[in-house]
Amino acid sequence: MSIQKRNAVLIVLTYLFTTLITKSIDSTFRMASYNPLVEGFNIKLLISFLIWITIYLIIYFVLSRFVFKDKTKKEN
Protein backbone atom coordinates (compact mmCIF):
# COMPACT_ATOMS: atom_id res chain seq x y z
CA MET A 1 0.00 0.00 0.00
CA SER A 2 1.39 3.39 -0.93
CA ILE A 3 2.04 6.00 1.75
CA GLN A 4 -0.65 8.36 0.43
CA LYS A 5 -3.27 5.61 0.40
CA ARG A 6 -2.19 4.46 3.85
CA ASN A 7 -2.55 7.98 5.24
CA ALA A 8 -5.97 8.42 3.64
CA VAL A 9 -7.25 5.14 5.07
CA LEU A 10 -5.74 6.01 8.46
CA ILE A 11 -7.50 9.38 8.60
CA VAL A 12 -10.86 7.98 7.48
CA LEU A 13 -10.76 5.11 9.98
CA THR A 14 -9.66 7.46 12.75
CA TYR A 15 -12.54 9.82 12.00
CA LEU A 16 -15.10 6.99 11.91
CA PHE A 17 -13.94 5.40 15.16
CA THR A 18 -13.75 8.79 16.86
CA THR A 19 -17.26 9.69 15.80
CA LEU A 20 -18.68 6.39 17.03
CA ILE A 21 -16.93 6.56 20.39
CA THR A 22 -17.72 10.23 21.05
CA LYS A 23 -21.38 9.73 20.12
CA SER A 24 -21.64 6.95 22.69
CA ILE A 25 -19.86 9.06 25.32
CA ASP A 26 -22.11 12.04 24.56
CA SER A 27 -25.24 9.93 24.86
CA THR A 28 -23.99 8.44 28.13
CA PHE A 29 -23.54 11.91 29.64
CA ARG A 30 -26.75 13.22 28.00
CA MET A 31 -24.91 15.70 25.81
CA ALA A 32 -26.05 14.16 22.52
CA SER A 33 -28.99 16.52 22.14
CA TYR A 34 -26.88 19.63 22.77
CA ASN A 35 -27.11 22.16 19.94
CA PRO A 36 -24.92 25.26 20.38
CA LEU A 37 -26.95 27.24 17.84
CA VAL A 38 -30.14 26.83 19.87
CA GLU A 39 -28.86 26.62 23.45
CA GLY A 40 -25.95 29.01 23.05
CA PHE A 41 -22.28 28.39 23.61
CA ASN A 42 -21.43 27.09 27.04
CA ILE A 43 -19.17 24.61 28.79
CA LYS A 44 -20.86 21.61 27.10
CA LEU A 45 -19.42 22.69 23.77
CA LEU A 46 -15.92 22.94 25.20
CA ILE A 47 -16.19 19.58 26.95
CA SER A 48 -17.53 17.88 23.82
CA PHE A 49 -14.77 19.38 21.69
CA LEU A 50 -12.02 18.37 24.13
CA ILE A 51 -13.39 14.82 24.34
CA TRP A 52 -13.47 14.59 20.55
CA ILE A 53 -9.89 15.84 20.17
CA THR A 54 -8.59 13.52 22.90
CA ILE A 55 -10.30 10.44 21.46
CA TYR A 56 -9.11 11.36 17.95
CA LEU A 57 -5.48 11.63 19.06
CA ILE A 58 -5.61 8.36 20.98
CA ILE A 59 -7.14 6.45 18.08
CA TYR A 60 -4.76 8.02 15.56
CA PHE A 61 -1.78 7.03 17.69
CA VAL A 62 -3.01 3.46 18.15
CA LEU A 63 -3.85 2.95 14.49
CA SER A 64 -0.66 4.54 13.18
CA ARG A 65 1.63 2.70 15.60
CA PHE A 66 0.07 -0.75 15.78
CA VAL A 67 -2.29 -1.30 12.86
CA PHE A 68 -0.56 0.60 10.06
CA LYS A 69 3.03 -0.14 11.00
CA ASP A 70 5.77 1.00 8.68
CA LYS A 71 7.39 -2.19 7.38
CA THR A 72 10.77 -0.78 6.40
CA LYS A 73 13.97 -2.14 7.88
CA LYS A 74 16.44 0.13 9.57
CA GLU A 75 19.78 0.13 7.87
CA ASN A 76 22.86 -0.04 10.08
Image (cartoon, rainbow, N blue to C red):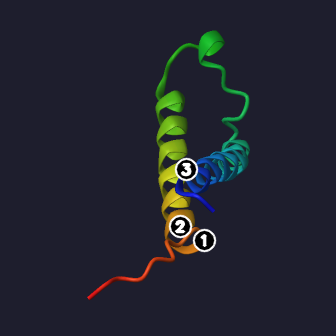
- In percent of width and height, residue 27 lies at 73, 43
Q: Which badge, 1 or 3, is on the more N-terminal residue?
A: 3
Amino acid carrying label 1: it is Val
Q: Which badge, 1 or 2, is on the more N-terminal residue?
A: 2
For the residues labelled 1 and 3, the Cα–Cα distance comes to: 16 Å
| Disc assigned to residue 54 | none
Residue topped by disc 3: 4
Q: Classify residue 37 by image quadrant.
A: top right
Helix, strand or loop at label 1? It is helix
Residue topped by disc 2: 62
**In the displayed structure, does residue 43 sit left or right of residue 21?**
left
Q: Is residue 65 above or below residue 7?
A: below
State yes or no: discs 1 and 3 in contact (Cβ < 8 Å): no
Pointer 2 local density, CA inside 10 Å: few below 14, some 14–19, many at least 20? few
Residue topped by disc 1: 67
Pointer 3 local density, CA inside 10 Å: few below 14, some 14–19, many at least 20? few
- At x 59%, y 18%, the residue is 36
Amino acid carrying label 2: it is Val
- At x 66%, y 26%, the residue is 34
- At x 51%, y 36%, the residue is 49
Q: Residue furthest left?
A: 76
Q: Is residue 43 above or below residue 68?
A: above
Amino acid carrying label 3: it is Gln
- In percent of width and height, residue 64 lies at 52, 64
Q: Given this view, does label 2 or label 3 mark the residue nearer the observer?
A: 3
State yes or no: discs 1 and 2 in contact (Cβ < 8 Å): yes
Which residue is nearer to you in this view: 48 or 64?
64
Q: Is residue 72 above or below residue 50?
A: below
For the residues labelled 2 and 3, the Cα–Cα distance comes to: 19 Å
**In the displayed structure, does residue 53 sit left or right of residue 1?**
left
Helix, strand or loop at label 2? It is helix
Helix, strand or loop at label 3? It is helix
